[in-house]
Image (spheres, rainbow, N blue to C red):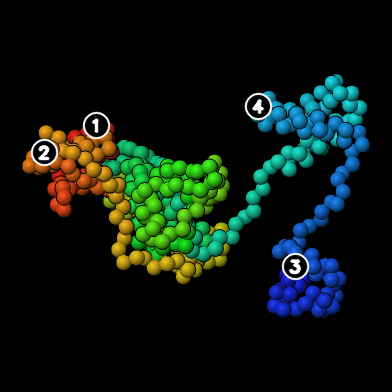
């Protein structure tokens, strides 16, 4: 392997293939093969394995195995069942072992293979997880935003009452503020808060709020394959880590603000850890992430859902499934609404006329302004 690396490095630095062959004492064909592959490809069988007694039956076996893909796993052919059917229905005279070996090889060929990834600095992954918490004495489900920098394993966690579009964006804004930089790209799944539609050609129509957020930070978004959680395995692992380490026992805090301040402190403390397989702390490796990340824009993005409404005769205006009060002088007027993760702001023309704590109940009526 060391010779392989030296030959490739020498040629990359300008040595010709002829010179490399002479210098390292190998053939020019060997040099050519070394340049064709970044790592040794290993032994490759040039001719298929010959199984005289089985070869004429492989198409039958392949057809059965292909049909099996559409039936429940427990009702698929075993090697024993394939052997019995070949013998009883098609006059197969070979042994069970060659049938078993063929099916084992077919199974190996069909398995998806994975290569451990070396993550480039500056790229991120994001997702949401869930856990039970007690906020102000009320047990409820928390939806926590998980932001991971896979190169360094630095993380940011923030909890919300719901995983809404504005929570997704608010989580990013706080994560960027925590690190003081904007990543090169972020890898996501195809959550409907982010992706309004996947078009037939595979391109994505982004949700309106998320699209504005990407434009504000000049951020490149990337997406995993639908149903393939392993595409963003780093943040999937972070979700589990945060649940096991930050939310056991069930967290108990007087407010969401207090809970999130504590979570942020845990993320900061974690930067002093040295993870298995590494010799440097997370914080030391984070420096390499920060070097290639971009500076924050002069102003942060306004992470809110925008809507419009009309005030009722009871001086109420509906946002989502709840009603919020406004001064009676604005009855029957058209108003605009801004839905943040923690409050709802209501305005008329250029005036802000009411601010309320946001309710995540259904059919709630909120009278007490902030």
Q: In 3D space, how far apart are the residues under numbered discs 4 and 1 (Cα atoms)?
A: 45 Å
**What is the secondary structure assignment of the residue under circle 4?**
loop
Q: Residue at x 84, y 25 (%)?
A: 86
> Can you give x and y, in whole percent of width and height, for residue 331 in the image?
11, 38
In the image, what residue occupies the spot 40% across and 65% down? Answer: 181
Q: CA distance from mark 3 to mark 4?
A: 45 Å
Dot 1 or dot 3: first in sequence order is 3
Residue that carries the numbered disc 4 in the rendered image: 71
Q: Residue furthest top?
A: 88
Q: Which residue does the numbered mark 3 point to in the structure image?
A: 35
User: Does the rendering let one see residue 354?
Assistant: yes
What crowding class fits label 4: few (fewer than 14 Cα within 10 Å), some (14-19), or many (20 or more)? few
- Image side of residue 280 versus residue 193, left or right: right
Residue at disc 1, secondary structure: loop
Q: Earlier in the sequence, mark 4 or mark 2?
A: 4
Query: Residue under circle 2?
Result: 331
Please give the residue where the numbered disc 1 appears in the rendered image: 363
- Label 1 Cα crowd, 10 Å radius (few <14 / some 14-19 / many 20+): few
Crowd around label 2: few <14 · some 14–19 · many ≥20 (10 Å) = some
Mark 1–mark 3 CB contact (< 8 Å)? no
Write down the quadrant of residue 67 in the picture: top right
């Amino acid at each position: 392997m060391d010779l392989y690396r030296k030959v490739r490095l020498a040629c990359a630095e300008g040595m010709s293939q002829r010179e490399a062959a002479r210098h390292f004492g190998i053939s020019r064909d060997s040099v050519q093969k070394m340049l064709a592959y970044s790592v040794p490809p290993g032994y490759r069988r040039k001719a298929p394995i010959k199984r005289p007694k089985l070869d004429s039956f492989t198409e039958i076996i392949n057809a059965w195995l292909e049909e099996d893909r559409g039936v429940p796993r427990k009702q698929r052919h075993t090697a024993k069942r394939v052997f019995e059917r070949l013998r009883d229905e098609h006059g197969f005279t070979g042994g069970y072992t060659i049938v078993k070996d063929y099916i084992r090889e077919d199974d190996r060929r069909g398995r998806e293979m994975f290569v451990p990834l070396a993550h480039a600095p500056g790229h991120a992954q994001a997702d949401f997880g869930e856990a039970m918490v007690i906020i102000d004495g009320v047990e409820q489900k928390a939806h926590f935003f998980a932001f991971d920098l896979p190169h360094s394993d630095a993380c940011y966690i923030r909890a919300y009452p719901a995983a809404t579009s504005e929570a997704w964006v608010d989580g990013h804004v706080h994560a960027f503020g925590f690190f003081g930089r904007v990543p090169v790209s972020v890898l996501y799944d195809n959550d409907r808060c982010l992706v309004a539609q996947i078009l037939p050609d595979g391109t994505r129509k982004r949700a309106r709020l998320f699209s504005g957020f990407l434009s504000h930070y000049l951020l490149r978004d990337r997406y995993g394959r639908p149903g393939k959680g392993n595409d963003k395995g780093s943040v999937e692992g972070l979700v589990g880590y945060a649940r096991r380490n930050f939310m056991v026992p069930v967290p108990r805090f007087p407010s969401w603000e207090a809970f999130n301040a504590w979570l942020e402190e845990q993320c900061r403390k974690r930067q002093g850890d040295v993870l298995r397989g590494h010799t440097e702390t997370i914080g030391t490796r984070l420096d390499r992430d920060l070097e290639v990340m971009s500076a924050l824009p002069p102003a942060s993005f306004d992470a809110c859902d925008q809507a419009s409404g009309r005030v009722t005769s009871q001086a109420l205006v509906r946002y989502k499934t709840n009603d919020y009060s406004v001064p009676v002088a604005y009855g029957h007027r058209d108003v605009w609404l801004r839905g943040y993760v923690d409050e709802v702001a209501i305005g008329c023309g250029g005036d802000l006329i009411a601010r309320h704590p946001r309710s995540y109940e259904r059919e709630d009526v909120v009278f007490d302004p902030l």
